[in-house]
Amino acid sequence: MNFNFTFSGSIKKIICRSFQLSVVIISLTSLTLTESIAQTNIKLGGGAGIMFPVSDFSGSTLDYYNGSSYGLSSGFNINGKAKIILPGFNLAAEIDYSSLSNTGNSEPGQGKVDISQKILSLKVGPELRINLPEFPVTPYIGINLALNSFSGETTFQGVSKVSSASYSVNGETRFGGGFTLGTEVSISSSLSLDFNISYNLMNVSGKNWTDVNPGINQRIDSYLSLNDERDPLYTSSDDKHFVSNARNIQSVLFTVTLLFSL
């Protein structure tokens, strides 16, 4: 299942303003939390879901080998979530762990590539509730700021320009954010199910190119870090420096979380 989204400059400005608004709301909430804590309801829980890579995070193993994308397919997610229920909105914090992978050829009809990527994400942001007093459901919309940590491994077998072996990918951290739509369904006075879909921009800030083995000119170096920035040594005729553009890491995440009211 593939999604492909592009963002214009104006939409990027909206995203930046949304992040700024999130920071303001979180700051104001922190200032007033001490006074209102006696009336505050807190919810805690955990759940699972499916992550779909989109934009340059998706694609095929051929795309990964030639440097145009990360070539990943959908994978599983587990999460822990906390919500502070305040008048009109929630302040939500979440920790997600996702595992994505893909297997295929490096070039048409030859070579084998196994890709795996692990992502640990920490998110915080407001959720605006839409209260429906006569119904046991509470829809909400939200935005969040995120810190995303990436790690992984790639195995090459019978690939013409890379030695056959399994290679660990250096851990990298990127700042991002996202937009959410969800609804809580009450099961009892202290228990609810949170159904959530989010669109996540996972490397809005911090894109970088890392040369793991500086001074050694070899193709494998391009795969040993996240390398979401353009290769500064790229030339169209050099098959060792082939990543020609910065790459956007984005995903769509579906989760179901069981929440307990404290």
Image (cartoon, helix red, strand yellow):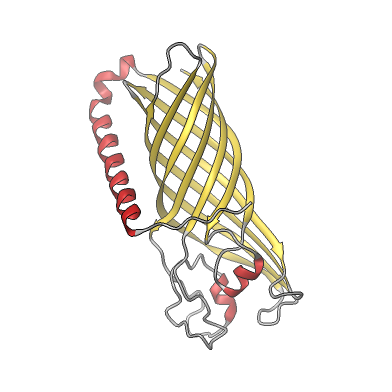
Of 33 and 135, the residue lying toward us? 135
Q: Is residue 239 above or below residue 107?
A: below
Residue beneath the point at 38% across and 39% down: 143
Of 140 and 45, the residue lying toward us? 140
Of 234 and 27, the residue lying toward us? 234
Q: How many marks?
A: 0
Q: Is residue 48 above or below residue 251?
A: above
Residue beneath the point at 23% across and 30% down: 31
Q: Give the image quarter of residue 32.
A: top left
Residue beneath the point at 49% across and 27% down: 183
Q: Give the image quarter of residue 30.
A: top left
Q: Is residue 132 above or below residue 156?
A: above
Q: Is residue 178 above or below residue 260?
A: below
Q: x, y percentage for residue 262? A: 46, 17
Q: x, y percentage for residue 244? A: 48, 76
Q: Is 168 on the left-hand or right-hand side of 113? A: left
Q: Give the image quarter of residue 73.
A: bottom right
Q: x, y percentage for residue 77? A: 59, 42
Q: In the displayed image of the protein, which residue is found farthest to the bottom?
A: 237
Q: x, y percentage for residue 45? A: 53, 27
Residue beneath the point at 41% across and 67% down: 208
